[in-house]
Image (cartoon, rainbow, N blue to C red):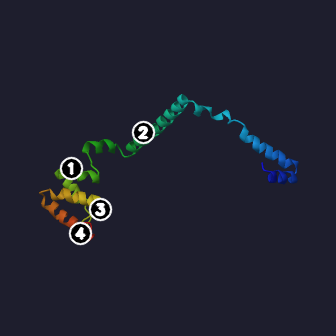
Amino acid sequence: MTKDLEETLSSLGPEYGNMVACMKGAFDKPLSRKCTIWRKPSLLAAATLVAFLGGASVLCLQFSAGAKARGGAVAEGASKKRLSAFMLANEKTSDAISEIIRTQNPDGSWQTDYLTRKNADALFSSRNPAAKLAYRKAMRNLRARGLL
């Protein structure tokens, strides 16, 4: 401590000196041994594994409970091979083109600008007359919004 601080401390009284001594002593002691598990790599790895497996089991239980609540829709959807909106543009089947046309908004767009461009490209290569109309609506939407 500096001389100025020692003078201030002595003017406050002896009980403040004891408090400062206790505070200074707190930093001189080694860390407590309460957290020794984290210092051993094997115990740390075991604790991490237990936490990971616990989280995975909770997610599995929630997934199976959700499947039961939907009445087994997971198995039905897997056999039907339902594709997301972003995967439909990559599929060039007639079912995928029909789904793209069905999900088109009245203004000629889809959920996002990216999806609108991808679906327009997929519709362009189709020979379906309804797909040609949907393609023209999509291109009109993209031009009107300045994205072409």
- Mark toward the viewer: 3 or 2: 3
Q: Position of residue 5 (x, y in %)?
A: 80, 52
Residue at 57% in and 30% down: 40
Q: Amino acid at mark 3?
A: Asp
Residue linked to disc 4 = 143
Residue at 24% in and 57% down: 118
Q: Give the crowd class for mark 3: few <14, some 14-19, many >=20 residues within 10 Å.
A: some
Q: Determine contact: label 1, label 2, CB under 8 Å.
A: no
The answer to whether residue 15 is left or right of residue 129 is: right
Looking at the rendered structure, the number of numbered marks drawn on it comes to 4
Instruction: Return the disc, 1 or 3, that comes first in the chain's sequence.
Output: 1
Q: CA distance from mark 1 to mark 3?
A: 19 Å
Q: CA distance from mark 4 to mark 3?
A: 12 Å
- Mark toward the viewer: 1 or 3: 3
Residue linked to disc 2 = 60
Q: Position of residue 93 (x, y in %)?
A: 17, 50
